[in-house]
Amino acid sequence: LSTVVLAQAQGTWPTKPVTLVVPFAAGGPTDVVARTLGAAMTRTLGQTVVVENKLGAGGTVAASYVAKAAPDGYTFFIHHNGMATSTALYRKLSYDPLKDFEFVSQAVEVPMTMLARKDFPANNLQEMVSYIKANQAKINLANAGLGAVSQLCGMMFQRAIGVQLTEVPFQGTAPAMNALLGGQVDVLCDQTTQTVPQIKAGNVKLYGVTTRNRVKVLPGTPTLAEQGLKDFEVVVWHGIYAPKGTPKAIVDRMNQAVRTALKDPDVIKRMDDLGAEIVPDATNTPEALHAWLQSEINKWGPVIKAGGKFAD
Ligand code: MLT
């Protein structure tokens, strides 16, 4: 873009709908966060925030797409821990998460829940672990592909109890949840932003939450760690990015729009109802997101490499 065009773009941005790319299927946990924020941001920006679901390879197809998209302020990306874990899971990535993006803002943190299909023959975590150990060969574990947090949680769980299950990848945990509801898969670890309504409706069995502390929206549900899976902790965090080179003035305005959305009463209520926690405003800066991503790459890299599961 020429300097003149760029200056004009920054002055009036946005003059058309802004796309927010979601790396997983519509209706799933990442999509829920994106659409909730997008609706509130539409009010602030005066242009529609359009959610586009770009599926595949545990979120890396979407990340690669956004890294190569025009840095004109009309393409943004929401992604979770997968932005960090994929660097260890994939031998070759066509993008560098730290270098090929502008960092906009952190957003929310979400607990995960360990679930099984409704008729799974175990009524608590202890029974679940015993049953899985005794029937390892026939248990299917659903996830949203290598790079998805459902895959990360499932990997940690298998390692914690010492089993290797058949993993069934979907293009998001929305279709994985449908398979669990239909009884085509047995076990799924997924974010509360999708699972709370299914848990409350009694459509799935719940064995614990993956956070260090119990979760307000699921009172009475113990953590996996307190039930004996020592130090088990997976917390999902969502960040918002833009292609590298997106003008700083636009990134800053998008940052403001995200932060305004996170103070919107409708967003607060919906996130609260779904167990998601809004990141404190003071840490919702591009710099904080960059530092956090770096720390997450450092944290998960060795954990994943120890698991020895990679894709090209
Ligand atoms: C995941 O498992 O990483 C995501 O929650 C998938 C999704 O948002 O569908």
Image: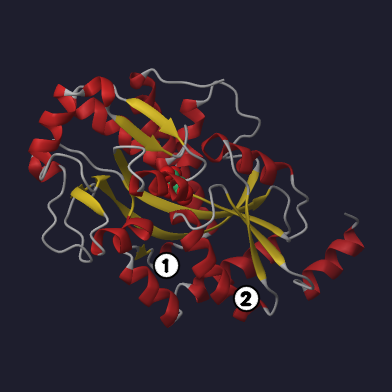
Tell me, yes or no, if residue 299 can be seen here. no
Q: Within 8 Å of ligand 1, the CB of disc 2?
A: no
Q: Is residue 145 left or right of residue 307?
A: right
Q: Which residue is at 54% across, 55% downward?
A: 26
Disc 1 element: helix
Quarter that holds the N terminus: bottom right
The front one of 131 and 29 is 131
Number of numbered discs: 2
Disc 2: which residue: 42
Occupied quadrant, residue 192: bottom left
Give the residue type at disc 2.
Thr
Residue at x 40% of width, y 52% of height: 237
Quadrant for the C terminus, please. Answer: top right
* In-image side of 205 versus 311 (left or right): left
- Position of residue 215 in the picture relative to residue 238 (left or right): left
Secondary element at tag 2: helix
Q: In this figure, which colouring scheme has been used for the structure?
A: secondary structure
- Marks 1 and 2: which is nearer the front? 2
In the drawing, what numbered circle is on residue 242? Answer: none
Q: Nearer the viewer, residue 183 or 146?
A: 183
From the viewer's perspective, tell me whether residue 10 is left or right of residue 264.
right
Residue 149: x and y in percent read 40, 42
Q: Dot 2 surroundings within 10 Å: few (below 14), some, or many (20 or more)? A: some
Residue occupied by mark 1? 282
Coordinates of residue 304 in the picture (x, y in percent):
37, 26
Provide residue 7's location: percent of width, then percent of height: 84, 66
